[in-house]
Structure formats: structure tokens, C-alpha cells
Image (cartoon, rainbow, N blue to C red):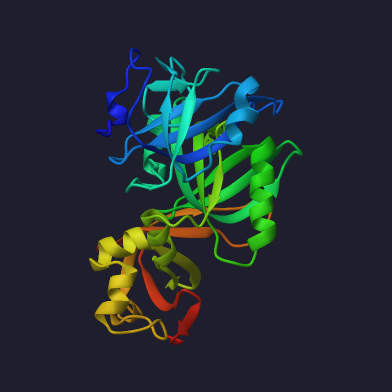
Amino acid sequence: MDSQSIRDLDSEKKIWSGQCRVSRMWLGVNVHTDKVLHLDPILMDSKGNDIWVQIPPVLIEKFKKVLKENHVYIIKNFDINTTGLKYRPIGNPYLIQFSRKTIVYHVLEVPAIPTFKFSFLNASQMAGKLGHVVILSDAITTTSLTRKTIRKELTLQLIEGDVVKVFIWGRVIQQFDKIIDAHGDDQTILVISAVSVGEFKDELSFSSSGSTVVYRNLDIPAVKAFATRYRVQLEVQSDLKSAVFVLFEYEGKRYFGLSGHELFQKNGQNGDLPPDELLQLVGLTKKFHVKFKINLFADSQADFTVLRILEPAPKSLSCVCKGLNVAGLHLDLGL
């Protein structure tokens, strides 16, 4: 049987001969009441095309016993329509709806079908998504703070180094707490799916939806890249004042022309000492374009994130780099 693509599906096709993997699956709920609305699998074919499925409450128990994440199936006798919904977890405008006539066949010889597909959003794209559905945000947890019992406010760091607020609700709080309780001291990179962009106190933020699922340390390229990126703390001084600036992978690669992994490989180092390119920053006078944030509720210094390293212009405010800290390795030259 020739395998068909998800792209072949339209409102007239009720029987599909293609094989598809259940990439993700969750219970779609009302974010305010936690009432279960439907079971939501995401199906993916061998070409990486995906489609959202909704299974009504009366059929959830039946298909929960049949459908398993990461398994492959052939599905027949279903309805397919355009979603017509403002909020949807993926970009495909079509939606499969199961009925009592729907038949699912488990495929034992698993073909080469991707497991996950995400559309990641960075901070610079948030404004363009205001009021629209954001498919996914990829972030690493830095701090968390409970504001209300039904809502938790998180401060998360995106893959480019930007720090944003993420508000999670109901069952998503339980997912998050379970991950943190089990792996609190380990490196944790979270993929938070199907979040929307909103405004909170004049700042753009993410909010979980009824389709949001929190994943930890997924085996996908984006998470691997995030886990191996570098984070450099620069101790800088301007006149008589000093501060710590944080340089993340994105700007570091733009300045040095190499990623952190490439820098260490180029110098044949294993992380015991910083690469020469980083060491050469020490003692130099540079102009830093930084973003800073002050926590008014904590007795701590402002957080400075380096957005650009520039050559100092005459009479401009510049800083001297006195020392650096790479991935927990501190080097203070006492200049």
C-alpha cells in the first residue's frame, strides 16, 4: 500500500492509508475549571507533516487504551474539518475528529517517522504574536514564584538568553512541580508547548493554554544545542564601579564567529580552562550594549545581559573586563 502524506488529507477524505506516529498526546482542558474537553493527539507522517486530532470525552477511555505516544498507526473512518479556531497547538488548519466509527490499526514495523516537531519562538518574535497562538516556547528554568494557588508565575530564560515571564495554570502547574521536585538540582531544559503571548505590567509574557504540555530535556537538536551552549560571566569595571555582565551563546557566536562548543574544540580544550578568545577579553576596554533588569522585591544587584560588544568610541562610557566565569569556572586576574 502506498503511504500517503498528511498533506493529502482534506474534508472529503475519510479513509487514509498513510502511517502516522502519535508525536504528542494530552488531555485538552478548560484552563479555568480543569474540565476535560477532549483527548488531543498530534499525528506526524514520515515527511514531518503533522495534524491535530480531537477525541470527544465519550471516546477518551476507548482510545487512551489504544493510542500511545511514539507508536505508529493507520487510522480510518474519521471526520476532517478546518479548525476555525483562534487557538490551536500547531499550524495545520485542518483538524481530525474521531467518532464511534473510527478504526485504529497499530503498526508493529515502525517506519522512519520523526518523533517531535516544534516551532520555537524567540523574544524578538513575541510582539508579532501578541493576541495569536504561539506554538511553542523553548526555555530553561531559572526561578519560580507562586502568586496564586491556581496560577504560577515563572521566570524563564529563552534559548537566546532573553528572560521572560511565563504564567502557567491548573494541571500545568502540577506537571512543572513534578519535574522540579524530581530533578531540582539537575540541569533542566523545558519545552513548553502551545503557549500564547500576552502583556503583563506592560511586558510581553507567555501563558499556558488548555493544550500546554511541559517536557524536560527532550532528545531533540534544539535542546541539545541549548544544553551545550556557553554562558560567560564578565566582571567589568567603569570608573570606580563594577558589575557582572552575562554573555550568552547567541551574542558570543556573533562576536567570536564560533559557538562555545566550537571555541573549545578549536583550542583542543575540555573545559578545564576558558578558550584563548575568551581570555583575551580580560583587560580590554569595550563598549557594551546591555539589557538590565532590577528585582525590586529582592536584595540583589541588577541582572545585565550583553546584547552587543562594540569598540569604544571617543568619550563614550566604556568598561574594562577584569575577569570571567565560564560554566562555573571562575578566573579572576585581579587587574
Q: Residue 221, located in which quarter of the rendered image?
A: bottom left
Quarter of the picture containing the C terminus is bottom left
- Residue 300 vertical position relative to residue 118 in the rendered view, above or below: below
Nearer the observer, 236 or 62: 62
Give the total of numbered labels: 0
The outermost residue toward the right is 149
Residue 267, image x, y percentages: 27, 83
Residue 104, image x, y percentages: 47, 30
Would residue 311 be seen by someone viewing this image from the given angle? no
Nearer the observer, 240 or 284: 284
Kindly identify the residue that appears in the image at 37 percent across and 38 percent down.
125
**Along the horizontal axis of the image, is 144 left or right of 148?**
left
**Along the horizontal axis of the image, is 42 left or right of 250?**
right
Q: Residue 281, located in which quarter of the rendered image?
A: bottom left
Kindly identify the residue that appears in the image at 45 percent across and 83 percent down.
331
Residue 68, image x, y percentages: 53, 41
Would residue 222 be seen by someone viewing this image from the given angle? yes
Residue 273, image x, y percentages: 39, 85
Nearer the observer, 170 or 145: 170
- Residue 57 vertical position relative to residue 244 in the rendered view, above or below: above
Quarter of the picture containing the N terminus is top left
Kindly identify the residue that appears in the image at 40 percent across and 55 percent down.
220
